[in-house]
Amino acid sequence: MSNSSSITKVFLLAFTDTRELQLFQFWIFLGIYLAALLGNGLIIIAIACDHHLHTPMYFFLLNLSLLDLGSISTTVPKSMANSLWDTRAICYAGCVAQVFMFLFFISAEYFLLTVMSYDRYVAICKPLHYGTLLGTRACVHMAAAAWGAGFLTALLHTANIFSLALCQGNAVDQFFCEIPQILKLSCSHSYLRELWLLVFGSCLFFGSFVFIVVSYVQIFRAVLRMPSEQGRHKAFYTCLPHLAVVSLIINTGFFAYLKPQSSSSPSLDPVLAVLYSVVPPALNPLIYGLRNQQLKDAVWKLILKYAVFEVHLSCVL
């Protein structure tokens, strides 16, 4: 292919050519996707409906669930459809949209996790100033900044990537359109532009990473100075889920995007992509929900309220 303007379709990676295994992968992804929809959907509705959960921590958790739903809905449904219908094709415009939307959601989620680390820092290290530093307006501004930074990051990267000439074929070794795999198709010699893209992205994400690390160093120092063992346990209990999610996304995502192309592997790359794009949206409701009694109570109250309404409705009918 001479350039990207002549490409009308992109062919995605098939995990296997065996029809039975393709259907098995479809059912696995369907189960994960439904779990993510159910878990994140319950968290969103519970937080929105329960006024006791209208606090900064739960406000940010609601935004995290929205971003999780967006990111997993960008990649998994198309992969499931390809497995079900035994095809690999995605239109060129769909590939561009997939790159933009996935970058938007995953970048905004990373920036939101940075904001959530600040929330935990203020709650533990400066509890007397929590209401002042994290008022309603401040929380809305920080959440909007995370969404806006994700949008800007996705726009710059997508515009830069798809302005390059793609002449190394149109087959992507991934189950969705991913930047490192798209770059392999490029024959452009715009090394300075690619270097600028890498430096810009690295500085932005590394700055957030340093902020998260510094926040948690201060948090752990404050927790270890607490005289009450129960207080220390409660502080660790609220911080460890957030730290686990951050670690999973950073370790897998950074390795997938910053590793040399020479170390890419057709078998390793899809596994890494699943770990940072599919697993976190499905696990986040479990990580945050199962470890938070107040949130579990709100979810159960919501389920029981719906069950009572269904029984009442059936009796009326």
Image (spheres, rainbow, N blue to C red):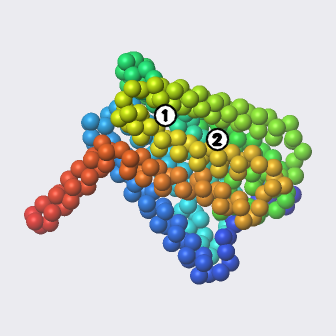
> To which residue does mark 2 refer?
154
- Nearer to us of marks 2 and 1 is 1
The answer to whether residue 246 is above or below residue 213 is below
Q: Residue at x 30, y 42 (%)?
A: 294
Nearer to me, 150 or 241: 241
The answer to whether residue 118 is above or below residue 46 is above
> To which residue does mark 1 refer?
116
Give the x, y percent position of residue 226. 42, 26
Within-10-Å neighbours for mark 2: few <14, some 14–19, many 20+: many
Q: For residue 184, what is the image quadrant? A: bottom right
Is residue 306 visible in this depiction of the protein? yes
Q: Is residue 200 left or right of residue 81?
A: right
Q: Which corner quadrant holds the C terminus?
A: bottom left
Q: Residue at x 72, y 36 (%)?
A: 202
Q: Secondary structure at mark 2?
A: helix
CA gap between label 2 and label 1 equals 21 Å
Give the x, y percent position of residue 18. 65, 81
Q: Amino acid at mark 1?
A: Met
Q: Residue at x 15, y 63 (%)?
A: 311
Q: Which corner quadrant holds the N terminus?
A: bottom right
